[in-house]
Amino acid sequence: MTDYLDAAAEAAQKAGALLRENFGAALSVSAFEAHDIKLELDVRSQTLITEHLLGLYPDHAIYGEEGLAGNQGSEFHWIVDPIDGTVNYFYGIPHFCISIALRRGGDIIAGVVYDPMRDEMWRAKKGEAPTLNGKPFAMSGRTRLSDAVISVGFTKTKEAIASGMSLFERMVYRVRKCRLMGSAALDMAYVACGRLDAYIEQSVSLWDVAAGKLLVESAGGLVEMAPHPDAKEKYSVIASNGKIDLRV
């Protein structure tokens, strides 16, 4: 799995260099949506990642936010978010990342989350402790909700926004601080290394959280993930250090 993890890290660094070079420049927008933006750069970033990974593993598959590639019948699927935090990126907010995970059968076995602006690379492989820039890290040890800093994610539908607002209102009175960061993968990486105590979102795609889930669980945290009842290929996610009680 080390070879797979190295390949993911190399692909993320290539995509990260592309994003750094274009950060703050005039960007080509593929689509403006109600609460989202699709950039031509999303496609370019995923193309770089796809070419790198399938160049090394031509029989593998790509399952990405910007489409599918490779042998979809393979037992190995690379789950790719080429820019997690596209709206942040477009508005010049330097909080976004590249997320790449490898799924074999039904298990996520390796994953990276790379923040190219801070040059921070989280790496995880199943059964081993994760690292940040090659060094081990520890989750938060906080146990009281009143001491916690949590991130609440909001998605794009009217129903999801209403549900997220209700959750945010319940939490904001009980925790030290609530944050809305704009990048699910970075939120989960931050939970894994103790910067946040929990991340909650009620409708995300697998590419948003696949690598982050492995990071949190490999660090000793807890991830509850369930298919969304009303949205195909969407999931609700609660990721935490496993020590705080998030029931409110």
Image (cartoon, rainbow, N blue to C red):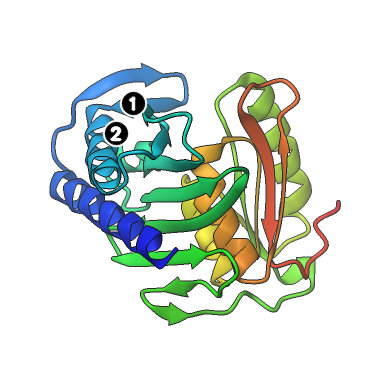
Q: Is residue 137 visible?
A: yes
Picture residue at 22% right of the left edge, 47% below the top: 19
x and y percent of residue 12 in the render? Answer: 30, 53
In the depicted structure, whether residue 158 falls above or below residue 146: above
Horizontal side of residue 55 vs 103, given as left or right: left
Q: Which residue is mark 2?
A: 42
Q: Which residue is mark 1?
A: 38
Closer to viewer: mark 1 or mark 2: 2
Horizontal side of residue 171 vs 85, given as left or right: right
Q: Is residue 91 visible?
A: no
In the depicted structure, whether residue 40 falls above or below residue 55: above
The image quadrant where one finds the N terminus is bottom left
Picture residue at 28% right of the left edge, 66% below the top: 119
Horizontal side of residue 99 vs 150, given as left or right: left
Kindly give the residue lying farthest to the right in the view shown. 248
In the depicted structure, whether residue 3 falls above or below residue 166: below
Q: Amino acid at mark 2?
A: Asp
x and y percent of residue 87 in the render? Answer: 37, 36
Secondary-structure class at tag 2: helix
Q: Residues within 10 Å of mark 1 (few under 14, many from 20)?
A: some
Q: Are marks 1 and 2 in contact (CB under 8 Å)?
A: yes
Secondary-structure class at tag 1: strand
Q: Residues within 10 Å of mark 2 (few under 14, many from 20)?
A: many
